[in-house]
Image (cartoon, grey):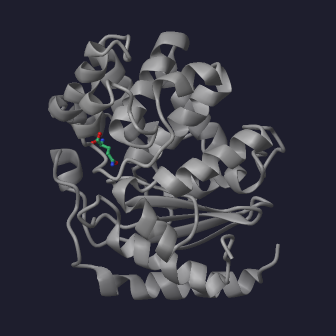
């Protein structure tokens, strides 16, 4: 690797030590009780390099609800198992410029969601998975376990049922797509699978390890297995750069300059192609649903490492 391991350890330690400066900014997700009760002022950070080595600081081993980071996992399952033409006929690849749970474009664009990383798009991908894959909950959890190298990784069933009890908005997105004939399955079944993905409980170390293959041309650093082809890998990173942080994707590219995916649990994963994956977690969110302290930490990390894939 082109960086010094002990310097990276020092950098992560410094970032974790400084993170409390941003505690108090933003608020934890409050749309479901299970997330509203999370202790707000926590911070973790982990890095996994392309040799599979892990660096960590703060609460890097504390599991959190991955939420929208599951949209990436679901898309990976879809491209592994399905005909790609089927996917891209039903979901777009353009940034939406709207909030992650927005419905406004869906009517104008006749039930075709802008991209797989907003709720409508992720629900559509989930519909494809439900219709083509047996035991999709199991497949999802097993892939997360295998990628993270953590056989204990599990769904937080309390989060999953809390999501279902407050499903109205996601149900509205799914029903509108169903009305246009783009979503085919039973809405509640699609929601159940989507919510279970959101409710996967993973730590910063789990997430960094799970997505390190995206920094390694689709090859898992631990065992050399091919997760996606080099072309699919490049495409996933392109989509993460343009759409991974919803209507803050442009600002994220400006500030951090890396492909990334955030979730309302406060986690953000980012990819330094050819070098490493990064995961930060801190539950307080900005108005876009992205972790405030997490974004700050990524800016400092990228600056400190001197990584600049965009030049
Ligand atoms: N479970 C959340 C929802 O469906 C996920 C959204 C997110 O993390 N941005 O609204």
Rendering quarter of residue 306: bottom right
Say which residue appears at 62% left-offset and 67% top-offset: 47
Q: What percent of the width, then of the height, locates residue 232? A: 70, 39
Residue at 66% x, 76% y: name it: 308
Going by the image, does 63 lie left or right of 217? left
164 to the left or right of 301: left
Residue 134 seen: no
Residue shown at 79% from the left, 45% from the top: 219
Front residue of 234/17: it is: 234
Q: Total marks drawn?
A: 0
Between 174 and 209, the one nearer to me in the picture: 174
- At which x and y percent is residue 32? 17, 44
Q: Is residue 189 above or below residue 58?
A: above
On-image quarter of the C terminus: bottom right
Give the quarter of the figure containing the N terminus: bottom right
From the viewer's perspective, is 108 left or right of 231? left
Quarter where residue 36 is shown: bottom left
Depth check: give the residue in front, 261 or 11.
Answer: 261
| 258 versus 116 height, above or below | below
The residue lying toward the viewer, choosing from 269 and 44, is 269
Which residue sits furthest front? 108
Query: Residue shown at 28%/50% (left/top)?
Result: 99
In this rendering, is residue 83 above or below 109? above
Question: Is residue 67 in sight in this rendering?
Answer: yes
Where residue 45 appears, as percent x and y from the top left, is 51, 70
Quadrant of the displayed image that contains ligand 1 = top left
Q: Residue 273 vs residue 43: left or right?
A: right
- Residue 6 picture location, percent across and down: 72, 85
């Amino acid at each position: 690797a082109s960086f010094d391991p002990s310097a990276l350890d020092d950098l992560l330690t410094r970032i974790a030590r400084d993170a409390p400066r941003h505690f108090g900014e933003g608020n934890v997700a409050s749309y479901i009780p299970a997330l509203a009760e999370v202790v707000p002022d926590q911070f973790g950070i982990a890095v996994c390099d392309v040799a599979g080595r892990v660096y960590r600081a703060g609460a890097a081993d504390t599991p959190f609800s991955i939420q929208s980071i599951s949209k990436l996992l679901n898309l990976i399952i879809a491209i592994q198992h399905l005909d790609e033409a089927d996917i891209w006929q039903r979901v777009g690849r353009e940034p939406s410029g709207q909030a992650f749970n927005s419905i406004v474009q869906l009517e104008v664009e006749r039930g075709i969601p802008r991209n797989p990383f907003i709720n409508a798009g992720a629900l559509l991908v989930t519909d494809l998975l439900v219709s083509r894959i047996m035991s999709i909950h199991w497949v999802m959890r097993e892939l997360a376990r295998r990628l993270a190298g953590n056989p204990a990784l599990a769904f937080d069933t309390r989060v999953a049922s809390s999501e279902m009890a407050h499903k109205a908005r996601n149900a509205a997105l799914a029903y509108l797509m169903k009305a246009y004939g783009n979503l085919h399955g039973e809405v509640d079944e699609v929601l159940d699978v989507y919510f279970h993905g959101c409710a996967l409980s993973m730590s910063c170390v789990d997430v960094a390890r799970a997505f390190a293959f995206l920094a390694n041309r689709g090859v898992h650093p631990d065992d050399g297995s091919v997760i996606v082809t080099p072309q699919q890998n490049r495409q996933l990173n392109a989509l993460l750069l343009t759409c991974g942080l919803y209507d803050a994707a442009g600002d994220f590219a400006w500030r951090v300059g890396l492909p990334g995916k955030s979730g309302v649990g406060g986690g953000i994963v980012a990819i330094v192609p050819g070098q490493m994956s990064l995961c930060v977690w801190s539950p307080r969110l900005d108005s876009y649903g992205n972790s405030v302290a997490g974004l700050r930490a990524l800016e400092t990390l990228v600056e400190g490492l001197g990584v600049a894939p965009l030049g």
